[in-house]
Image (cartoon, rainbow, N blue to C red):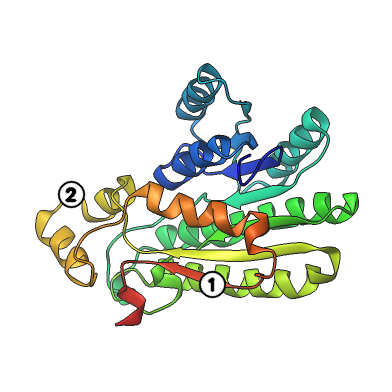
C-alpha cells in the first residue's frame, strides 16, 4: 500500500517541474490528484499522462492569484471525490535578476502576487475545506532556499519566499487543533525551467548558482517531490510548522 493510498490531493502549479514531479509521485503512492495550473495545455497533457498510466487524476485550470478560481478547484475536488485530504502549493513566479534599486515595479508586484497572494488564496480555501470536514489533513507549501537565507539579485523573490515560511508557521499553529498539519519545503536550485528562465540560460550565471551548492549540482524535481510525499504522509504525523530544506547543503553553509 502506498504512502498516500486513497488520499484526495490538490497540487497547484502542476504543470511546472516540481509540481508535475509531485503529481507523479503522489499517484505512484496511491493518491487521487486534482491538478491545477494557469497553463491549460500542459496541465491537460499531464492529466492525460497520469490517466493513461491507470492513475486517478483530473485537471482544473486556475489562476492562483484569483481567489474564486482557487475556491472552484477545491470545490471540484470535494464534489467529485468527496473530500480533500492533502494539498501541495507549488505555484510560483521567480521574477528577474536585478539589483533592488533597479528592480522593475511591475515584476515586484507579480512576484508578490503569485507567490504570496497565490499561496494565501490556496491555503485559505484548502484549510476551510479540511477544517469544515473535520477529518484533519496535510498541506505542504513550497518556499525556497531563498526563503531561508538571503540572496542578492532577486529581493522580491527572497521577500515572497520568506513570507511563505511565516504564513506556513501561522497556519500550522492556528489549525493544529483541527488535526491539520501545515509544513513548508524549501528547495534549492533545481534542474527545471525556473533557473533557466531567471538566468536566460547564461552558463556563467548558472555555474555561479551551482557553485554555492555544497553537493555541487542542481537538484532534480523528483528529489523535491519525494520529501513532499513524506511531509504529507502519516509518517510525518508529528511534523507541523516545519521548514524542510532540500538544497544540497546550501542553507547549512
Which residue is located at x 60 percent, y 54 percent?
A: 118
Q: Nearer the viewer, residue 56 or 36?
A: 56
Task: Give whichever of discs 2 and 1 has the lower sequence position.
Answer: 2
What secondary structure is found at the residue carrying circle 1?
A: strand
The quadrant holding residue 166 is: bottom right
The quadrant holding residue 4 is: top right
Residue 128 seen from this side: yes
What secondary structure is found at the residue carrying circle 2?
A: loop
**Split into 4 quadrants, where in the image is the C terminus?**
bottom left
Residue 102 as seen in the image, left or right of residue 208: right
Q: Which mark is residue 16?
A: none
Above or below, 91 against 96 in this view is above
Report, in whole angstroms, how far the alpha carbon at label 2 lies from the one at label 1. 29 Å
Q: Nearer the viewer, residue 152 or 20?
A: 20
Q: Residues within 10 Å of mark 1 (few under 14, many from 20)?
A: many
Give the x, y percent position of residue 185.
51, 63
Above or below, 39 against 4 in this view is above
Q: Nearer the viewer, residue 76 or 63?
A: 76
Report the mark closest to the observer, 2 or 1.
1
Question: Which residue carries the number 1 mark?
Answer: 243
Residue 232 as seen in the image, left or right of residue 151: right
Give the x, y percent position of residue 108.
44, 63
**Split into 4 quadrants, where in the image is the N terminus?**
top right
Question: Which residue carries the number 2 mark?
Answer: 201
Amino acid at each position: 500500500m502506498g504512502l498516500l493510498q486513497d488520499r484526495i490531493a490538490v497540487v497547484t502549479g502542476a504543470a511546472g517541474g516540481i509540481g508535475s514531479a509531485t503529481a507523479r509521485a503522489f499517484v505512484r503512492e496511491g493518491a487521487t490528484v486534482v491538478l491545477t495550473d494557469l497553463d491549460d495545455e500542459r496541465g491537460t497533457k499531464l492529466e492525460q499522462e497520469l490517466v493513461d498510466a491507470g492513475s486517478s487524476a483530473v485537471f482544473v485550470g486556475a489562476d492562483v492569484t484569483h481567489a474564486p478560481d482557487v475556491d472552484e478547484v477545491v470545490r471540484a475536488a470535494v464534489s467529485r471525490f468527496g473530500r480533500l485530504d492533502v494539498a501541495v502549493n507549488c505555484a510560483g513566479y521567480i521574477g528577474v535578476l536585478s539589483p533592488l534599486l533597479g528592480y522593475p515595479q511591475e515584476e515586484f508586484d507579480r512576484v508578490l502576487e503569485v507567490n504570496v497572494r497565490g499561496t494565501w488564496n490556496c491555503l485559505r480555501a484548502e484549510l476551510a475545506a479540511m477544517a469544515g470536514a473535520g477529518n484533519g489533513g496535510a498541506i505542504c507549501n513550497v518556499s525556497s532556499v531563498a526563503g531561508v537565507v538571503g540572496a542578492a539579485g532577486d529581493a522580491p523573490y527572497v521577500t515572497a519566499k520568506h513570507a511563505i515560511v511565516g504564513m506556513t508557521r501561522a497556519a500550522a499553529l492556528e489549525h493544529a487543533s483541527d488535526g491539520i498539519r501545515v509544513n513548508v519545503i524549501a528547495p534549492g536550485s533545481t534542474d527545471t525551467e525556473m533557473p533557466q528562465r531567471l538566468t536566460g540560460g547564461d552558463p556563467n550565471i548558472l555555474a555561479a548558482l551551482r557553485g554555492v551548492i555544497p553537493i555541487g549540482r542542481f537538484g532534480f524535481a523528483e528529489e523535491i517531490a519525494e520529501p513532499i510525499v513524506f511531509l504529507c504522509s502519516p509518517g510525518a504525523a508529528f511534523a507541523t510548522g516545519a521548514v524542510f530544506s532540500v538544497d544540497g547543503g546550501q542553507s547549512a553553509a
